[in-house]
Image (spheres, rainbow, N blue to C red):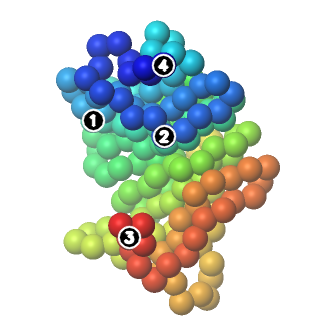
Amino acid sequence: NDLTPVGSSSGKLNGTSGGRQVGASQTPGGPHAVLINGNALGVVDLHNNNSYYYSMAMCGDDSQQGGWGYSRSGGIHALVWSGSSNSCVDLNPSGYNFSYCLGVHKGEQCGYAQNQSYFITASHAMSWHGSATGCVDLHPVGWPYGYSRATGCHDGEEVGYVSTLAYPDG
């Protein structure tokens, strides 16, 4: 079953839940986050053209989709959608240049936020509950690790990793 959205030159799937898939489709203007309802004809373009140059959906549950978008105000920002482009919420926490949403479950979102000038100076695992102001920094205090990421969440629990490397996964 080809899930490439109609009119798209290519697509990428990153997650699935309840018979729906999330990812991005390549449009002439760049990648757009998409929600696919089981086949290529059931595609919802989640991209918000007014606020982001391009976007990518990374995860989803039965009601929300999480990912990121390259903000027109600068930097990559964690985003959460509820099935449409109009529902897009920017999760980027105050004090961080970049953020990514990697997991969603029942109203919780998780991922990481980082500061960067010429190199990454901090990367902290984060948990959100629908807004940037409701973010919780999950980075372990007092540990000798400068970098952490939350990669998934379920029923109020988060999973992820800590590292001494800014890019431990390549």
Which one is closest to the eye, mark 2 or mark 4? 4
Tag nearer the camera, 4 or 1: 4
Label drawn at residue 1: 4
State the separation of the CA atoms marked 3 and 4. 34 Å
Check disc 1 and report the residue beneath it: 53
At label 4, the amino acid type is Asn
Circle 1: residue type: Tyr
Neighbour tally class for label 1: few under 14, some 14-19, many 20 plus, Cα within 10 Å: some
| Residue denoted by label 2 | 14
- Whether label 3 touches label 2, CB < 8 Å: no
Rendered view: 111 above or below 37: below
Query: Disc 3 vs disc 4: which is toward the camera?
Result: 4
What is the spatial separation of the Cα atoms under label 3 and label 2, in whole angstroms? Answer: 20 Å
Q: In the image, what residue occupies the spot 26% across and 69% down?
A: 117
Q: Real-space Cα distance between discs 1 and 2?
A: 20 Å
Q: Secondary structure at mark 2?
A: strand
* Amino acid on which disc 2 is placed: Asn
Left or right, 107 with respect to 164, comes to right
Relative horizontal placement of residue 97, taking residue 39 as reference (left or right): left
Of marks 1 and 3, the one in the foreground: 3
Residue marked by disc 3 = 167
The answer to whether residue 25 is above or below residue 100 is above
Residue nearest the observer in this picture, 139 or 35? 35
